[in-house]
Amino acid sequence: MAKIQMTTPLVEMDGDEMTRILWQMIKDELILPYVDLKSEYYDLGLKNRNETDDQVTVDSANATLKYGVAVKCATITPNQARMSEYDLKEMWKSPNGTIRAILDGTVFRAPILVKGIVPYVNNWTKPITIARHAYGDVYKNVEIKVPGKGKAELVFTAEDGTEIRETIHNFDGEGIIQGIHNTKKSISSFARACFNYAIDTKQDLWFSSKDTISKKYDHTFKDIFQEIFEAEFKEKFDELGIEYFYTLIDDAVARVIRSNGGFIWACKNYDGDVMSDMVATAYGDLSMMTSVLVSPSGVYEYEAAHGTVQRHYYKHLKGEETSTNSIATIFAWTGALRKRGELDGINDLVRFADTLEKACIKTVEDGKMTKSLSLISTCENPVILNSMDFIKAIRSTFDELY
Ligand code: NAP
Ligand code: MG
């Protein structure tokens, strides 16, 4: 069969450790034999980030703004141990943070469901996608440990010197205070990314906060979502038969547990941090979570939610066999290729991506899987495969379906 031709390049961001090894295997076995891959390649491996003073990360994000779709491999976020391991000039920032700041994006995480891996919440038959606002609140807080008696105030000074002042508390002993903020711009971007992604994936959108208690802070989030929805998205939602609704976070938690899934749950920064770990765990396994960064202008960057799987990489370096699950990384590729196909009107590329995803799921449902999946699968006699043989098994399932 002739290879599928592409018209616009995909921004390809290579990464680190075990996922870098998987990246090459996926390309060689599952992509390049079928697609005449047109990609603009950026090496975000830590060695190259260090050599380019992290310019490569900035360049890859700008290329994503230019072309509209990127696929990213997991990357190391340096810490003290990595400084000596890679002989770094600086403790470079998290690439995901740098890219997110340039794209002004929101991260959407969703599990990949397969028969045999049953969510802890057994009525969750469809995926729940969590959208986490990634700016401000407690993550950019200012805190004071109050040493003793005194008055704490909240003061805003405008450019012209006028003040708004509120008493927080009159302390009669030791205590603590915290100042947090957010911006209309960031909340609006978050809202637009959520509405766009709901339209894109034809799913309902829920947004929750605690506006009954936080009558200005959380209430502003609620108001911004509502205003943007009515002004820019309501018509399209009606057309598609999907729904946006706001509810209190307590009510949302109760409804989520009773639901069948199949919607997007938009959360404030802290709520999203906590709830995404809860939802991911309840669905089974981090290696089955996908992640996509969506900008308010509709630019997409696809990746796996897990990291570089460092422990497996060290085994691999020692020449030992690994059984690392490549499914989330494969889904990053299929997500990006499908989006490229949709934007460029290349139906074959869309069909290729759909079929490759089906092949991943069918391979696991047929009982062929990696070690960590076999531990949570209800499959009677799973065949446990090493990293490469699992990818080869997916290829042979793909060839049957394609
Ligand atoms: P990790 O790479 O997600 O791995 C943690 C553990 O989860 C692994 O040791 C493994 O457990 C299991 N696991 C994760 N993905 C798996 C897969 N595909 N197949 C099988 N098992 C899987 O997290 P980490 O070890 O804490 O972090 C390693 C590096 O990744 C760090 O340098 C961190 O900065 C980076 N990181 C990058 C991203 C990103 O680029 N988006 C996200 C998170 C972390 P067992 O060892 O028990 O088998
Ligand atoms: Mg967390």
Image (cartoon, rainbow, N blue to C red):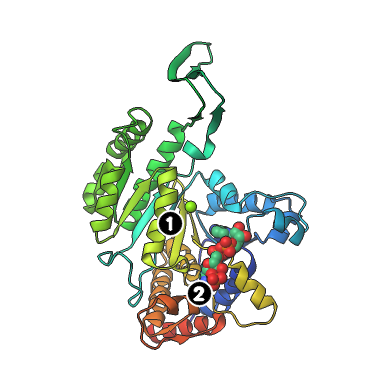
Quadrant position of residue 309: bottom right
Q: Is mark 2 within 8 Å of ligand 1?
A: yes
Task: Give above or below for 359 relative to 254.
Answer: below
Q: What is the number of the mark on residue 277?
A: 1
Question: Measured from the top left, where is residue 21 in percent x and y?
Answer: 62, 73
Q: Kindly indicate the quadrant of the structure image that contains residue 351.
A: bottom left
Q: Residue 111 location in percent, x, y?
A: 39, 64
Q: Is residue 314 left or right of residue 99?
A: right
Residue at figure coordinates x 29%, y 45% from the top left: 250
Q: Residues within 10 Å of mark 1 (few under 14, many from 20)?
A: few
**Distance Cα–Cα, label 2 vs label 1:** 19 Å
Q: Is mark 1 within 8 Å of ligand 2?
A: yes
Where residue 183 appears, as percent x and y from the top left, is 46, 32
Q: In the rendered image of this protein, does residue 149 appear above or below residue 271? A: above
Using the image, determine if residue 302 lies above or below residue 207. Answer: below
Q: Which residue is mark 2?
A: 325
Whether residue 176 appears in this view of the structure is yes
